[in-house]
């Protein structure tokens, strides 16, 4: 299986304070990965490094063939077009309706509005939000907003979805729906990396579990 | 309703700033043109007469355009007839010259010119005359100076308003631009909304400025002042509006580009 993410002696820091210290790991195409750890352990930091928000201060990090420690702005932009990012606070554009929010990645990719709209509606149907496409994010519940965020993260068929605490703050029912959507995306061939406080107890799919403790990453079986 | 109010107030800040800058630029241009044309009409009538003991061919001073000897034979004949007991052949009569200037001098320039001319030992006297026209011109210069000061102040205030608007824009648009950047949006895509707002604001401010300008130049006061000055003032409105549109679009687009770059 192709290696999608390769970290070698990776060191990440915030204001020169190391958070992740000389870690080595690989994530393969098609993997479903949970990254767990206590608050402040570096889960979000690690995830941020995967989408180029944070540059390594030591070692190397390859994502989708791009060396992120020395990536140029244009290359990063190109890489991000093949990623899907999901956040705990959804990060939907408040002044856009749900349909336009979901269309965002394919509009960026240069698809025309009509095709984009058609694809976005199809995506919203898959996440059970059809009928709410003209609503604004503030008019939706947390679970619905997260489903819309997942629809946005998958509409352009990315190679990798990075989700930061995607079910924190959601009720059990919404959390289950959201996790099902990640499972479906993974079954469709998309690699999923979820940073989470814990692994949902009813999660049944095969996954890999990375645990961060004191700046080191341990893969648990 | 609240969002509508917020949207209007956001637009108004930039529109007002642009209007103040555009009007400043336009009035600055108009005053310059009026002064230039008025200066042209009176410069030909303006001259300095000097009395010299030696013939002069050339005077090398910056303001001096040309020098011509005055023909005073008739005046001498008159004097000879009047004072028959004086033997004029024994008197060496002075030479009179008329100096044409390259531009209308300010009072201080005129004083300096007088001093410079009197430095030549053969020049015995310099006669300047300030006509009613030059008095009007000086008055216009004074009004021009005061108006330009106000224009510069209003222009600076306009720019300060724009800087304030940049901060507001950054607050309003940085989150959306950040989300777009996460999905790999190029520069133009991230800034598209801002560029659109900037262009619309530039267009609106131009229309309002154009209405104000048309009102000013067609006002009784403006037309009567122009006719009093007796100048040919034919302003090319098409060119002026084009220039103002270019300036306002450039200012607002550059402002929006600054916000997009600043939000990175």
Image (cartoon, rainbow, N blue to C red):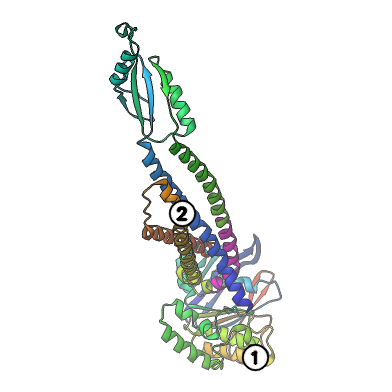
Asked whether B110 falls inside the magenta stretch, the response is no
Q: CA distance from mark 2 to mark 1?
A: 71 Å
How many numbered marks have been drawn onto this rendered protein structure?
2
The region drawn magenta spans: B159-179
Asked where in the image residue A108 lies, by quadrant, the reply is bottom left
Q: Position of residue A27 (x, y in %)?
A: 54, 78
Q: Is residue A215 left or right of residue B78?
A: right
Residue wearing tag 1: A174
Residue wearing tag 2: B222
Q: Nearer the viewer, residue B138 or A184?
A: B138
Q: Residues within 10 Å of mark 1 (few under 14, many from 20)?
A: some
Q: Position of residue A49 (x, y in %)?
A: 57, 70
Q: Nearer the viewer, residue B109 or B6?
A: B109
Secondary structure under tag 2 reads helix
Instruction: Establish whether labels 2 and 1 are both on one chain.
Output: no
| Residue at x 30% of width, y 23% of height | B69
| Chain ID, mark 2 | B
Asked whether B160 falls inside the magenta stretch, the response is yes
Tell me, yes or no, whether the two marked residues, 2 and 1, touch with CB atoms within 8 Å: no
**Picture disc at residue A195:** none
Whether B72 is drawn above or below A16: the answer is above
Q: Quadrant of the C terminus of chain A?
A: bottom right
| Chain ID, mark 1 | A
Q: Nearer the viewer, residue B239 or A212?
A: B239
Q: Is residue A11 left or right of residue B193?
A: right
């Amino acid at each position: 299986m192709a290696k999608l993410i390769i970290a070698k002696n990776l060191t990440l820091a915030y204001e020169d304070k190391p958070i992740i210290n000389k870690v080595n790991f690989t994530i393969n195409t098609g993997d479903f990965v949970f990254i767990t750890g206590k608050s402040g352990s570096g889960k979000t930091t690690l995830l941020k490094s995967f989408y180029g928000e944070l540059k390594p201060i030591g070692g190397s990090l390859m994502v989708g063939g791009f060396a992120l420690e020395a990536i140029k702005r244009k290359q990063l932009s190109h890489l991000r077009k093949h990623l899907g990012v999901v956040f705990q606070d959804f990060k939907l554009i408040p002044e856009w309706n749900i349909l336009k929010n979901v269309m965002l990645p394919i509009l960026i990719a240069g698809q025309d509005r009509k095709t984009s709209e058609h694809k976005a509606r199809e995506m919203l149907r898959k996440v059970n939000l059809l009928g709410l496409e003209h609503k604004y994010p503030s008019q939706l519940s947390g679970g619905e907003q997260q489903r819309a965020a997942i629809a946005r993260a998958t509409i352009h068929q990315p190679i990798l979805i990075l989700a930061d605490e995607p079910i924190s703050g959601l009720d059990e029912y919404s959390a289950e729906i959201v996790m099902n959507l990640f499972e479906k995306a993974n079954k469709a061939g998309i690699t999923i990396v979820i940073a989470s406080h814990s692994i949902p107890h009813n999660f049944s799919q095969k996954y890999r579990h990375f645990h961060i403790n004191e700046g080191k990453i341990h893969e648990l079986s | 309703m609240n969002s509508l109010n917020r949207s209007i107030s956001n637009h108004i800040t930039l529109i007002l700033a642009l209007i103040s800058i555009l009007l400043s630029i336009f009035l600055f241009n108009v005053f310059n043109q009026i002064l230039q044309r008025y200066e042209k009409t009176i410069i030909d009538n303006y001259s300095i007469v000097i009395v010299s003991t030696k013939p002069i061919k050339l005077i090398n001073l910056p303001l001096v355009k040309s020098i011509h000897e005055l023909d005073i034979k008739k005046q001498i004949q008159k004097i000879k007839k009047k004072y028959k007991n004086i033997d004029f052949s024994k008197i060496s009569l002075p030479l009179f010259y008329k100096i044409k200037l390259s531009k209308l001098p300010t009072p201080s320039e005129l004083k300096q010119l007088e001093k410079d001319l009197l430095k030549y030992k053969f020049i015995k006297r310099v006669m300047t005359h300030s006509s009613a026209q030059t008095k009007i011109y000086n008055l216009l210069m004074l009004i021009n100076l005061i108006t330009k000061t106000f224009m510069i102040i209003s222009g600076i205030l306009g720019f300060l308003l724009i800087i304030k608007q940049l901060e507001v824009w950054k607050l309003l648009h940085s989150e959306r631009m950040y989300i777009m950047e996460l999905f790999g949006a190029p520069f133009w895509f991230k800034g598209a909304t801002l560029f659109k707002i900037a262009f619309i604001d530039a267009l609106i401010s131009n229309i309002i400025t154009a209405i104000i300008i048309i009102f000013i130049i067609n006002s009784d006061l403006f037309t009567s002042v122009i006719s009093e000055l007796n100048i040919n003032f034919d302003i090319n409105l098409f060119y002026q509006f084009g220039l103002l549109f270019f300036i306002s679009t450039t200012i607002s687009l550059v402002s929006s580009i600054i916000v997009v770059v600043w939000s990175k």
